Image (cartoon, rainbow, N blue to C red):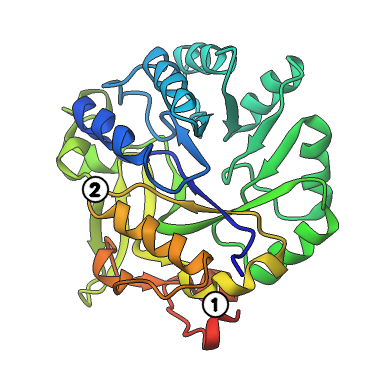
Amino acid sequence: MPLPLQLVLGPLLYFWPRDQVMNFYAEASSWPLERLYLGEVVCSRRQQLRTQDWIALAADIAASGKQAVLSSQALLESESDLKRLRKLIDNGAALVEANDAGAVHLLQQRRLPFVAGPHLNIYNSDTLRLYRRLGAERWVPPVEMPGVTVRLIAQANPDIETEVFAWGRLPLAFSSRCFTARHYQLNKDDCQFRCLEHPDGMTLATRESQDFLAINGIQTQSAGCHSLLADIAALPAHGVHALRISPQHQQLAQVVQAFAAAIAGQAPALDVATLAPGPLANGYWHGEAGIVLKEVAHGCA
């Protein structure tokens, strides 16, 4: 019997050329996804698509029969960032994912429902109840939160939907410094948009040559690819309603199909490790170091 889980596409965390972005979402509209998150979460300098372009794309996605959600920037640094945030929130149609407290404040002022994004630092039931009162109808736990904690918080808050990060390089932290520009010995304000050269981020290795992190402009990510595919059978019991697939440069359609097959109780047609941008990992979900890949017996957490 199919499990009651939705598949959703998270916001694009990388900087891709405009045509590539548009082609990607045109293709993704045909995948077995319930909703697609759109918008610039990482860096305000990434303006191949501007705010109005994202809003127009959301309307196109909605016209295709999918739900579109507009994701807000996680780190606001200027009045121009706030101006773009206000325009995003006042789009008049699409739900917004709030990724900082300023977005929550503006949404609450307008009495608009929203998704509480993974960057809001919701680590306990009291905090989630606060965001629920402010208008959150769904939350995405921080990516390092263990599954047992997600279960306790979700079960204590049955009136709000829980969506977990289920595939992709984990978004771990943000900084006012641009790591990609620093790598190329450039100033942040004259970065020459070098992120375009790294469509899945730039992998960093330890002195022992072990891939450890990835840099993506001002964002730090895991080098490994977090995957909850093997845990799918146990997720409904954790109060999980939706699985977030994070965009990657290649082979994402096959990843989505593998998750759809697992939700339907079928074995994936191929080994998803061959589709990942880095080695698979699921340690955080199991209360261990995030870089660990814990084997899951019979799909149970």
Q: Residue at x 19, y 45 (%)?
A: 198
Q: Residue at x 25, y 74 (%)?
A: 210
Q: Which residue is mark 1?
A: 288
Q: Nearer the viewer, residue 232 or 88?
A: 232
Mark 2: amino acid: His
Viewer-nearest residue: 36 or 164:
36
**Which quarter of the image is occupied by the C terminus?**
bottom right
Kindly identify the residue that appears in the image at 68 percent across and 18 percent down: 106
Report x, y in % for residue 231. Answer: 54, 73
Q: What type is the residue that disc 1 sits on?
A: Glu
Is residue 218 shown left or right of residue 149?
A: left
Q: CA distance from mark 2 to mark 1?
A: 28 Å
**Residue 149 found in image quarter:** bottom right
With respect to residue 267, does 187 lie above or below? above
Residue 136 to residue 251: above or below: above
Q: Which residue is mark 2?
A: 249
User: Picture coordinates of residue 254 (x, y %)?
Assistant: 30, 58
**SS label for mark 1:** loop
